[in-house]
Amino acid sequence: MNTHFFSDMGVMLGRSMRHILRSMDTIITVTIMPIGFMLLFVYVFGGAIQTGTDNYVNYLMPGILLIAIASGISYTAYRLFLDMQRGIFERFHSMPIARSTVLWGHVLTSLVSNSISVVVIILVALMMGFRSSAGILSWLAVAGILALFTLALTWIAAVAGLTAKSVDGASAFSYPLLFLPFISSAFVPTESMPSGVRAFAENQPVTSIVESIRKLLSGQPAGNDIWVALAWCVGIMLVAYIFAMRVYKKRV
């Protein structure tokens, strides 16, 4: 491994972040849709949805954050595809740098940009009445879960970006991910769903992640949900990472 791995990775991260800062519309686009969903569900559908809570925005928040992240990672696939098409990877590999840092630069950029989107959405939610009794440790746990979720989806995005044949194909993979929160406990309790849908909703990754974050933000013990959520996030991240690295070595 290159002895300057971390400094090389810092340079690649800086390069990708400059692209983000020069095109802030990507972050704006990522945040507008989840905020729109939040406004729609709280002020239009909220009165008709029975969740057993007085503050629906509190119930809604975890799912909205996951939708924002699922939307944001599509830009990682898009930027990776463009770098592949333009031969950027080959240019960097002709330099004395650690090869994997080029890919890690995109992944860490996704983590930073999605963190910005999450903060913006939480600020909007606070103006809508969101309140949390969580302590600092619970907030750190929430941040950790969201970071792992972001990394897991970003490595999936890396596979899509490296293997796509077109710009549309590079980002289209994220559409199914955006629907997963809707078939979970993010918007309504799973008990209200038909048996077949309920079985899927209760056993897919998003529900355990949503329930963990919801309990942490309300100051309650997360119980087994947090371990299931961590297992899903770490498992998906490791599998996606291995596939991404194999594709990266094969394609570049």
Image (cartoon, rainbow, N blue to C red):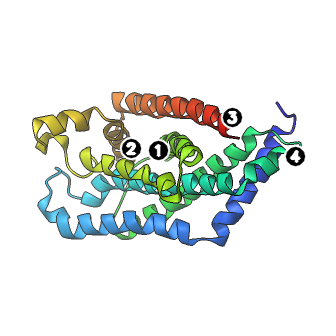
* Contact (Cβ within 8 Å) of mark 4 with mark 2: no
The three-letter code of the residue at mark 3 reads Lys
Residue at (28%, 49%) from the top-left corner?
186
The three-letter code of the residue at mark 4 reads Met
Cα distance between the residues tagged 4 and 1: 39 Å
The residue carrying pointer 4 sits among few (fewer than 14), some (14 to 19) or many (20 or more) residues within 10 Å by Cα, namely few
Q: Which residue is mark 1?
A: 142
Q: Which residue is mark 3?
A: 249
Q: Is residue 208 above or below residue 22?
A: above
Disc 2 vs disc 3: which is toward the camera?
3
The residue lying furthest to the front in this view is: 165
Could you tell which of marks 4 and 2 lies nearer the N-terminus?
4
At numbered mark 1, what does the secondary structure look like: helix, strand or loop?
A: helix
Residue at (13%, 43%) from the top-left corner?
193
* Contact (Cβ within 8 Å) of mark 4 with mark 1: no
Image coordinates of residue 225 in percent, x first then y, are: 35, 32
Viewer-side residue, 209 vs 155? 155
Could you tell whether 42 is left or right of 133 in the image? left
Disc 3 vs disc 1: which is toward the camera?
3
Image coordinates of residue 44 in percent, x first then y, are: 20, 70
The quadrant holding residue 213 is top left
